[in-house]
Structure formats: C-alpha cells, structure tokens
Image (spheres, grey):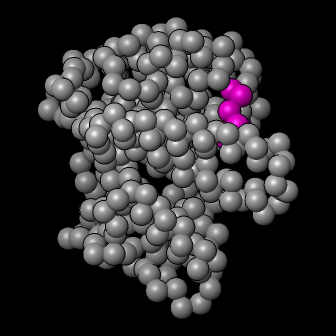
Amino acid sequence: MKPDFPYPYYFYGSKDSLDADVLIEISKDMMPAEQEDRKRLIKSIEQEYDLSWNANLIVVENGIITDTIYPKTWIDSLNNSLYSTYDNHKDKQVFPLPINRMVPRNKLLAIYKTVRTILSMLSRTHYRSTVKPILNGIHPFNLKIDAWRKIDLTTIDNFNQDNTSDVDAWKIIAFYLGQNISLIKYNLEIYTKIDLYVNHPLLKSFIYREEITQKDKQYLSQLIVYYLDEIVIPFGEYHFDKNIMICNDEKIDMTLRNIELEILEFNYWEHFKIAKDLSMILPLGHEKRVRLDDEMEKLITRINKIKNEIK
C-alpha cells in the first residue's frame, strides 16, 4: 500500500487466513448509486494505492454498516463479521472498530444463499442437468430443494469449475452448510474457520483443505439431508408474492436489485480479480486466461439479460 491512504480501513475474518480481507470505509455521499460504479470505484482505489487486499467498500452510520457494494445480499453478515472478528487482527488494525453492535440476520436470505451457492458449485458436474434449470431465474423454492435431494456428493470426483479449485469448492460447500446450520438452529453466527471447526469438527478436512476421503464425502452428503429435513423445510412455507420471496415474517426482494443479480455480479467481480492477478503472471492467450475470459463473458451476458428482462 502506498503512503497517505486517505480512508479508514479494517481487517476482518479468520486470524489464520492467507488473504487479507479488508473493509474500506467511505462517506455516504461518496458511495455511487449504481453497482457497476461501486465496483469501478474500489478498482480505482486498489490501483491508485497499490492495494493487495481482498477489499470491499462500506458506509457506517449510527454504529452499524448501512451500505456496501452488495447491500441486499451481504450487509447483515458483513456487519456482524466485522464486529465479531475485528479483534482477530489487533496487530494490524490502524483504526478503531467503527461499529458498536450486531444487527439481526435475515435468515431466509441466509438459507437462499446457501442453497443457491452450493447448487452453483455442482453446475459443471454430472448433476448439471438437474441443477441448471433451477439455478437462475425465479422459481418455486421447493424446486431447488427437490434438486438437492438428488445430489450424492460421494459420486463427485471433481467440480470442473474454471475459477474455483476442487479443494475450494469442497470448502465452500462445507462452510456454507456448517455456518447456516449453526445460524438457523442455534442462532450462532460463525465467521472464522476455527469457530466452524469447533462447532462442526467432522468438517475439518474440508475447512482446512486436507485430503478428502470417501468417508468425508459420505458425512457431507448426510449433512445435506439433515440440513434439508431439520433446517430448511421446518423453517416455514416458502412462497412468492410477485417478485418477493416470503417465509414467515422475512422477505427477499427479487426485483431489479434482486438476489440472483447481485450474486451473479459478485461472482463476476471475483472472476475479474482473478483475471487481474493472472494478467500479471500469464501471457495473453494462455489457456487459463482464455477460459476465465469465456466464463466472464457468460456471466456478463446473463447479468445483462436479467437487467433487460426487468426494465
């Protein structure tokens, strides 16, 4: 980082993480209204000050995070993650913790993100024909649940994801499951690897990227069945009122700034950061760069299609 960095910034997340996850605080007036402009802003800040962080922008008001690059999908968990893990990085912190409390979680949103994210990890396996039809768009949530019931993780050897290694895909599935089970069943919020391991010790191989055995896969498959039968289905009746997904007294707005669009845009941004890193070490035309460019093109095509459908 270059000297004279003008914004307060805060490290958060697991203490033993290999990456530096950082939230950069800006004023409410400085936060662009459009999501694309927000992504351009963080990119320009990273380039201008030579940042090597996994950075995100936040606005803080009245002791809580009130805005970020993806406010509708990440703001509650982002606020609580910073509040819970700020002290994990005391040796690196330059600025005091800017928030003073946790905020209530939207548990319906947490369930939706878990179900959809894990299905997306399976989109290039032999379960592609099961997953793809209900991955994008607004469908009855029960269709996603039905698709989950057809998944047997013991049959998966690799995920064939261009931007996510197999070991990371297993970690994502395990982390989302363990984190969501703890949140919904025990009202316990988990934001670090060690906390997930303490509460779900049988997920250790996945969390710490160790060798994954068939026995590990069997346990994870059993955990999916448990998650559906004991967490997702008992949570309540899922239904739509126009473009609003509702369960109990919680709602998700699936319109212009909808969850699917924000998840796709978040995935595009993650692809972009990987592409930026690869451009520093691989020549133009390298196989990995070409595959990643193709994947980004597919994402942007889907993003633009959704935006046009909603106009």
- The quadrant holding residue 35 is bottom left
Q: Please identify the quadrant where the C terminus is shown.
A: top left
Residue 230 falls left or right of residue 128: left
Residue 23 falls left or right of residue 235: right
The percent position of residue 303, horizontal first and vertical second, equals: 45, 40
Residue 44 falls left or right of residue 111: right
- The quadrant holding residue 49 is bottom right
**In the rendered image of this protein, does residue 197 appear above or below residue 38?**
above
Q: Please report the residue visible at 36 percent of the width from the left and 31 percent of the height from the top.
A: 112
Predominant SS along the magenta part: loop
- The quadrant holding residue 259 is top left
The percent position of residue 64, horizontal first and vertical second, equals: 26, 64
Q: Nearer the viewer, residue 152 or 226?
A: 152
The count of marks equals: 0
Q: Nearer the viewer, residue 44 or 117?
A: 44
Residue 26 visible in the displayed image:
yes
The percent position of residue 138, horizontal first and vertical second, equals: 33, 25
Residue 259 visible in the displayed image:
no
In the rendered structure, which segment of residues is drawn in magenta? Answer: 159-165
Q: Please identify the quadrant where the N terminus is shown.
A: bottom right
**In the rendered image of this protein, does residue 25 appear above or below residue 152?**
below
Residue 127 falls left or right of residue 244: right
The percent position of residue 7, horizontal first and vertical second, equals: 44, 81
The answer to if 237 sits in the magenta stretch is no
Q: Please report the residue visible at 64 percent of the width from the left and 77 percent of the height from the top.
A: 50
Q: Please report the residue visible at 54 percent of the width from the left and 67 percent of the height from the top.
A: 43
**In the rendered image of this protein, does residue 179 appear above or below residue 47?**
above
**In the rendered image of this protein, does residue 53 appear above or below residue 272?**
below
